[in-house]
């Protein structure tokens, strides 16, 4: 199939970090390389792998949208590829506008992979009406620089076509094509038992307003080997630093909160690299919950999963990929959701048998937009996988339940480095203020991570050596 734009040789990819960047946990959280949600890295890493073919370099932009960098981008890159999730939602509108401002200044192809609109399970777009001008401006700017725009599912496809856009292709999410046309998901046991290893995931909103807290509590009681896998930056900060200072710190029903029994039992994790996340899920029998990419990580690991859909973004993706799912609003007031029942009901036949067709549709979209893929034009990702396996990525973040010196060494080494840097920056600012004749205004001193950590162990802390 002929392409509408020349094959790209140097691609700028919107992502929090390159898959090859090994970032210590403390630094990853400080920089927020997951862009507030580790699920973002699953689809950005997959896109990186897919686009990395001989003669093409893929470069991460660090998720930043710098409008002033347009000139440099035009000079240094052949295409800007933008994998997105639920970008058409009110809270993302400011970022969407900044992306539009950048794209309008670009002269290179801009390819959007897997964007979605977010509303309720009823697919009513009314809540999106106020931001329609922003969506229209963004899609128009993209289509001026590409053959088509790739969307996640049926709702988003209809949403854009109802606006009058025609070059809209339903391609799903690139995360599902991490391993190309191959997807092997099968039940390894006839049924789940109390000894089964079960992973559960969810959002704070699902816990607060949709009864997921009762689902977690019931599963925790029935399955001794249950593990909760969080995705938010706040989840990670709670596990690693016991930081409950943000709004999510009030939601004690989340297993990543220090007051939750699963936290105290060490049964919660957050990952800052998809490779360790997927590897760990290979050892589980089943995964379920309201997080779409939490369950996609399980499917990529070959582990059966069921999604508890809480909105249009999860529902449309499950429908497109034939991922077993249940609408969370149809589970009943009692919310007696036993993973064993979900496991027994789940049929992975359509997911697996239809995957090849969906993969061909996805790669045809890339072809039309002048992008080669490793499975058709490269080594199928072999070099990528070999390089990834040569790197030593940090393990999943665990609950901080002890004062072991080894566990604390990295934390307080990082804090000491931060203090040194901030002290130097402060001295430099004071010198600049002195030269300008401006008086410095003292800022309020926030509660330090050190003080919060000291409250955990109940005594002064020393850096382990």
Image (cartoon, rainbow, N blue to C red):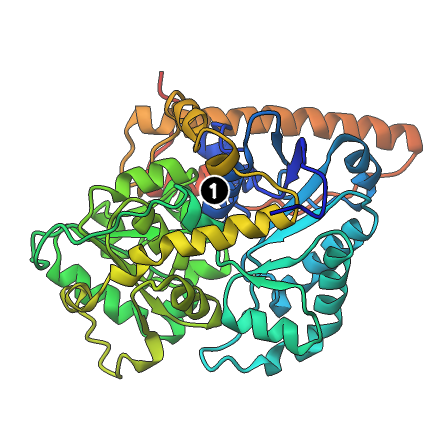
Position in image of residue 123 (x %, y %) = 50, 79
Residue 150, located in which quarter of the rendered image? bottom right
> For this rendering, which residue is in front, 409 or 30?
30
The image shows residue 73, relative to residue 227, as above or below, that is above
Q: Is residue 99 visible?
A: yes
Residue 133, located in which quarter of the rendered image? bottom right
Q: Callout 1: 10 Å neighbours few (<14), some, many (20+)?
A: many
Instruction: Tally the marks.
Output: 1
Q: Residue furthest top?
A: 465
> For this rendering, which residue is in front, 392 or 318?
318
Position in image of residue 446 (x %, y %) = 57, 46
Q: Secondary structure at mark 1?
A: helix
> For this rendering, which residue is in front, 115 or 208?
115
The answer to whether 22 appears left or right of 461 in the picture is right
The answer to whether 259 appears left or right of 78 in the picture is left
**Quadrant where the C terminus lies?**
top left
Residue 64, located in which quarter of the rendered image? top right
> For this rendering, which residue is in front, 288 or 322?
322
Position in image of residue 440 (x %, y %) = 80, 39
Residue on which disc 1 sits? 46
Residue drawn at the location 39% of the way across and 23% of the way down: 386
């Amino acid at each position: 199939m002929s392409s509408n734009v020349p094959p790209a040789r140097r691609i700028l990819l919107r992502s929090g970090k390159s898959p090859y960047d090994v970032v210590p946990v403390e630094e990853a959280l400080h920089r927020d390389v997951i862009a507030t949600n580790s699920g973002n890295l699953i689809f950005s890493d997959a896109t990186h792998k897919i686009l990395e073919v001989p003669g093409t370099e893929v470069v991460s932009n660090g998720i930043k949208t710098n409008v002033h960098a347009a000139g440099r981008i035009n000079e240094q890159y052949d295409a800007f590829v933008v994998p997105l999730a639920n970008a058409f939602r009110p809270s993302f509108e400011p970022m969407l506008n900044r992306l539009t401002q950048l794209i309008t200044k670009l002269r290179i192809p801009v390819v959007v992979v897997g964007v979605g609109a977010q509303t309720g399970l009823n697919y009513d777009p009314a809540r999106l009406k106020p931001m329609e001008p922003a969506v229209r401006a963004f899609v128009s700017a993209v289509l001026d620089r590409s053959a088509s725009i790739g969307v996640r599912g049926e709702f988003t496809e209809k949403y854009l076509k109802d606006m009058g856009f025609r070059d809209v292709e339903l391609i799903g999410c690139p995360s599902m094509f991490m391993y190309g046309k191959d997807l092997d998901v099968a039940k390894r046991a006839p049924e789940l038992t109390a000894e089964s290893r079960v992973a559960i995931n969810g959002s704070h909103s699902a816990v607060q307003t949709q009864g997921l807290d009762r689902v977690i509590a019931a599963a925790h009681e029935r399955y001794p080997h249950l593990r909760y896998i969080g995705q938010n930056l706040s989840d990670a900060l709670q596990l690693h630093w016991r930081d409950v200072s943000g709004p999510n710190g009030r939601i004690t029903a989340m297993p990543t909160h220090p007051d939750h029994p699963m936290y105290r039992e060490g049964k919660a994790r957050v990952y800052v690299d998809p490779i360790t996340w997927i590897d760990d899920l290979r050892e589980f029998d089943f995964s379920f919950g309201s997080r779409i990419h939490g369950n996609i990580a399980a499917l990529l690991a070959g582990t059966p999963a069921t999604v508890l859909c809480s909105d249009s973004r999860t529902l449309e993706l499950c429908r497109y990929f034939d991922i077993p799912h249940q609408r969370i609003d149809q589970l009943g007031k009692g919310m007696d959701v036993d993973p064993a029942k979900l496991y027994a009901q789940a049929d992975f036949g359509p997911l697996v048998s239809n995957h090849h067709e969906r993969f061909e549709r996805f790669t045809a979209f890339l072809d039309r937009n002048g992008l080669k893929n490793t499975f058709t034009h490269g080594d199928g990702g072999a070099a990528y996988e070999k390089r990834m396996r040569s790197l030593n990525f940090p393990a999943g973040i665990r609950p901080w339940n002890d004062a072991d010196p080894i566990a604390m060494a990295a934390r307080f080494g990082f804090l000491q480095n931060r203090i040194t840097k901030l002290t130097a920056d402060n001295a430099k600012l004071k010198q600049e203020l002195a030269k300008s004749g401006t008086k410095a205004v003292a800022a309020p001193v926030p509660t330090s991570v050190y003080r919060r950590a000291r409250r955990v162990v109940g005594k002064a802390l020393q850096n382990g050596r």
